[in-house]
Image (spheres, rainbow, N blue to C red):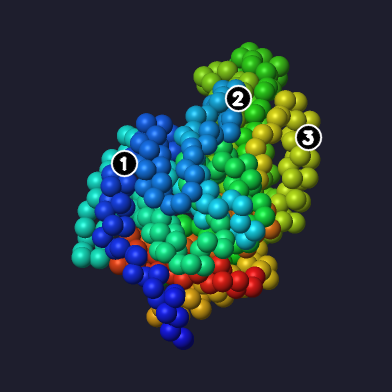
Amino acid sequence: MKQPSPSEAALFDAIDQRRMLERTEDWARINSGTTNMAGLAAMAEKLSGAFSALPGEVTLRDPAPVSAIDAEGREVELEHGRHLVVSVRPEAERRFILTGHMDTVYPAEHPFQELTWLDDDTLNGPGTADMKAGIAVILEALTAFETSDIAQSVGYDVMINSDEETGSLSSAALIAELAAGKAAALTYEPSALPDGTLAHARGGSGNYAVVFKGRSAHAGRNPEDGRNALVAAADFALALKRMQHDDLPINPAKIDGGSANNVVPDHAVLRFNIRPKTTSAADNFTHQVNDLVDTIAKDHDVEVSLTGGISRPPKPVDARAAKLFDLVKQAGADLGQTIGWQPSGGVCDGNNIAACGVPVVDTMGVRGGRIHSIEEFMIVSSLTERARLSALVLHRLASGAPL
């Protein structure tokens, strides 16, 4: 452990715990579930105003078109909110990207809408840890970083998207655009554990829908003339589970379809998720599932069409990412914070950034836990802990820390 230098220690004078907490509480009181367009618009307006304090251009970028398969097997367009982008010193040779998300998993009609203090340092509320507080940390850390002379030598982009909780499908191209050429990335998901442990390597994720078109018939008079789409879907689901192995968890999640008990069902839709731990597992699955489509279509004499794919590539930790983790760990140690890490089965925008060849640490947000539940909480004192950590990491990256 070493003490931060005088120029590094000066960063912390600009970090204001009360300001971060007030912002977090204000933002967490806005329901911004991924499907709540009004709530997302309100959040985007709030964030635009707050981030305008930085010396850069603030814009709201339109979401890319995204479609999905409905219960009848039809392709439908999905609505998404706009994404916030802040660009500071775009002409700088060395630049970074910091990312977060404004959406939560709680839709407008969800009963979990209130903030509750569990004790003097623990705040329960929707999106507190995941990740309204993380956004507050981004802004506070950058505000502190901008007080240093070294900040003028580098640039950065901030991206706060509106669809991370559903896979960032409408912002994936934007993430890739902004990540290109960056020296390093920091993403502000909450810590992997309440003690501040970071997520290290991550598996990937892919979501799929399979549409089965069979032929209706009377279940008593002429069932042999029917082609049971529901049975084909069930066979497909069982085959998927047989394809599962240690590097490829597969979860058949839902089957829509069927009809009256006396009708052979002529349509079904199967939805499933995969979590490949390696790139090779993801690539091999693509070939295997296409073969399965052909096999099920032939065996059941039905039409089978597959949509979807890998939206979050696996995120291994390469040599450059390992150096960034070490830099964060050392910065934490110099601040009296013990920071460890562990692999995670979860996914986030860090997966997308790593796929662009950019080293990323993607759990730089606050300490907290029980996210995606009505017991979600943040540890309030970690606002200052994490803001100081990020400001110090940014200062050292700007000072030329090798990756």
Q: Amino acid at mark 3?
A: Asp
- Percent across and percent down for residue 168 are 55, 43
- Give the residue at mark 2: 75
Q: Is residue 354 visible?
A: no
Residue pointed to by mark 1: 30
Q: Earlier in the sequence, mark 2 or mark 3?
A: 2
Going 53% across and 33% down the picture, which residue do you hit?
A: 62
Number of the front mark, 3 or 1: 1
Residue beneath disc 3: 294
Foreground of the two, 273 or 235: 273
Relative to 45, residue 261 above or below = above
Q: Is residue 27 left or right of residue 309?
A: left
| Number of the front mark, 2 or 3 | 2
Question: 154 or 349, which is in the foreground?
Answer: 154
Crowding around mark 3 (Cα neighbors within 10 Å: few <14, some 14 to 19, many 20+) is some
Asked if the residues shown at circle 3 and circle 1 are in contact, with their CB atoms under 8 angstroms apart, the answer is no
Residue 58 horizontal/vertical position (percent)? 47, 43
Mark 3 to mark 1 CA distance (whole Å): 47 Å
Q: Is residue 96 above or below residue 388?
A: above
What numbered label is drawn on residue 204?
A: none
In terms of depth relative to the viewer, which is nearer, 124 or 277? 124
As shown in the figure, which amino acid type bears the numbered disc 1?
A: Ile
In the image, what residue type sits under mark 2?
Glu
Most distant residue in the bottom direction: 1
Mark count: 3
Please tell me which residue is depicted at 22% across the width and 53% down the height of the picture: 116
Query: Is residue 85 visible to us here?
Result: yes
Residue 192 drawn at (x, y percent): 46, 64
Q: Is residue 340 above or below residue 180?
A: below
Q: Position of residue 346 (x, y in %)?
A: 53, 56
Q: Earlier in the sequence, mark 2 or mark 1?
A: 1
In the picture, measured across the screen, residue 209 lies left or right of residue 35, that is right
